[in-house]
C-alpha cells in the first residue's frame, strides 16, 4: 500500500551520482522533502551546505533497474522562508557583447516572499519599481537521477539524467520521467524557486528553501534517452546541451522516438511535429542549456 514519507536531510550533495541513499521508497509512494536554496541556506536562513545547488537525497526506488524509467509527479512546492534572492543584472551571455559594459554589477538582491498573499518583491527596488510585486509560481530548478557510467555530475549543469534544467514548467501538476541508469535510480531534488522567467536569464530565479512533495512511480523496460513529461498542456521532452541547437536536437529526437513508440512512422512524425510542435527555452545560463519540445494536448 502506498505510503507518505518525510525526508529532512542531514547530508546534501553537489553532484548527482551513486551516493548512499537517504531513503528508499516503493513505486506509488509519496515523499515530502525539505530542500535548501542554491547557496545552501535552509528555512531558518542557516547555511547547511556549500553551493552550487545542494541536493536533498538521493531517494532509492525499490525495483528500479537500468532500462526502466522513474516517474516523478510534482504534488506540491511549499515555500518555507520569507526571503529569497536573485542577481541584480542580466547574465552577460544573453545580451549583445557591446551591451555588457552598460549592465549593473551582478550583486545579490534580496527579495521578500509574502507567503500569505503569495507575492514576491525586491526588498530594495530601484525607484521605477517602488511597490512592484509579482505572483509566486514555485518550481524545481534542479532534480534528476544518478547518471550512467559511475559518473558524478555537478548540480550546476544538466544532461540525460536531468539536473539543473531550471524550467518554470517543473511545478505542481507536472509528471517527469527520467531514464534509470543505476539500480534504485537514486533520485535527487532541490534548488527551489519562488518564481522564475523563461531562460533563467539573470542566472537565478527567486532562490529560496522549500518543502517539495512528489509521488514516485516506475515504468519497467522503458529505455528513454532524455527526460519526458506530461502536464495539463500536453506532453514534452527535454534536451540539455550547449550550444542551444544541440539541446533542441536532443529534445526533438526524443519526441520523435516517443511518437514512433505510439505507432507513427517517419512521415507521420514529420507532419505532426512540423505543424504542431512548440519549443520553450528553459535555461540559457548554465553550462548546458535546456530546451523543451512540446506537443500540445489534443493534437493526436
Image (cartoon, grey):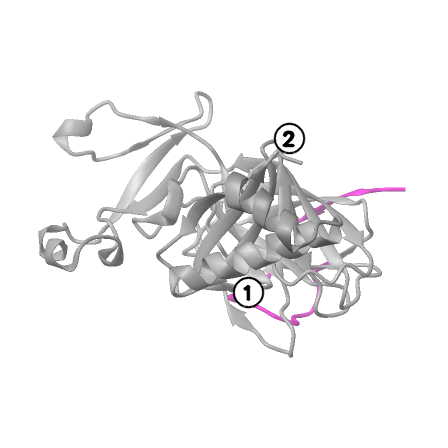
Q: Which residue is mark 2?
A: 298
Give percent across and percent down for residue 179. Answer: 68, 61
Q: Which mark is residue 13?
A: 1
Give the vertical position of 1 relative to 15 (above or below).
above
Magenta-tinted stretch? 1-23
Asked if residue 14 can be seen in this view, the reply is yes
User: At x 64% / y 79%, what residue is drawn?
Assistant: 149
User: At x 14% / y 28%, what residue is drawn?
Assistant: 128
Quarter the C terminus occupies: top right
Q: 245 left or right of 129?
A: right
* First in residue order: circle 2 vs circle 1: 1
Instruction: Indicate the secondary structure of the residue bearing disc 2.
Output: loop
Q: 264 left or right of 34?
A: right
| 2 or 1: mark nearer the eye | 2
Give the vertical position of 143 relative to 65 (above or below).
above
Which quadrant of the structure image shows residue 205?
A: top left
Q: Mark 2 to mark 1: distance in Å?
A: 40 Å
Q: Nearer the viewer, residue 105 or 82?
A: 105
Amino acid at each position: 500500500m502506498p505510503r507518505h514519507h518525510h525526508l529532512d536531510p542531514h547530508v546534501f550533495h553537489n553532484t548527482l551520482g551513486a551516493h548512499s541513499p537517504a531513503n528508499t521508497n516503493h513505486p506509488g509512494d509519496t515523499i515530502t522533502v525539505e530542500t535548501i536554496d542554491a547557496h545552501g541556506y535552509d528555512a531558518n536562513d542557516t547555511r547547511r551546505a556549500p553551493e552550487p545547488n545542494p541536493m536533498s537525497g538521493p531517494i532509492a526506488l525499490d525495483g528500479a533497474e537500468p532500462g526502466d524509467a522513474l516517474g516523478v509527479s510534482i504534488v506540491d512546492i511549499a515555500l518555507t522562508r520569507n526571503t529569497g534572492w536573485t542577481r541584480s543584472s542580466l547574465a552577460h551571455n544573453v545580451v549583445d557583447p557591446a551591451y555588457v559594459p552598460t549592465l549593473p554589477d551582478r550583486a545579490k538582491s534580496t527579495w521578500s516572499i509574502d507567503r500569505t498573499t503569495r507575492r514576491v518583491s525586491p526588498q530594495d527596488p530601484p525607484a521605477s519599481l517602488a511597490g512592484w510585486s509579482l505572483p509566486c509560481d514555485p518550481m524545481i530548478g534542479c532534480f534528476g537521477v544518478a547518471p550512467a557510467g559511475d559518473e558524478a555530475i555537478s548540480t550546476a549543469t544538466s544532461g540525460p539524467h536531468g539536473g539543473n534544467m531550471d524550467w518554470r514548467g517543473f511545478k505542481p501538476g507536472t509528471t517527469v520521467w527520467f531514464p534509470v541508469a543505476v539500480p534504485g535510480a537514486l533520485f535527487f531534488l532541490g534548488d527551489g524557486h519562488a518564481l522564475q522567467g523563461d531562460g533563467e536569464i539573470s542566472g537565478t530565479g527567486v532562490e529560496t528553501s522549500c518543502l517539495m512533495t512528489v509521488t514516485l512511480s516506475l515504468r519497467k523496460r522503458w529505455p528513454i534517452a532524455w527526460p519526458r513529461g506530461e502536464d495539463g498542456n500536453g506532453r514534452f521532452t527535454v534536451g540539455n546541451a550547449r550550444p542551444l541547437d544541440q539541446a533542441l536536437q536532443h529534445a526533438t529526437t526524443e519526441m520523435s522516438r516517443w511518437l514512433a513508440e505510439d505507432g507513427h512512422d517517419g512521415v507521420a512524425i514529420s507532419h505532426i511535429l512540423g505543424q504542431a510542435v512548440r519549443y520553450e527555452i528553459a535555461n540559457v545560463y548554465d553550462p548546458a542549456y535546456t530546451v523543451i519540445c512540446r506537443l500540445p494536448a489534443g493534437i493526436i
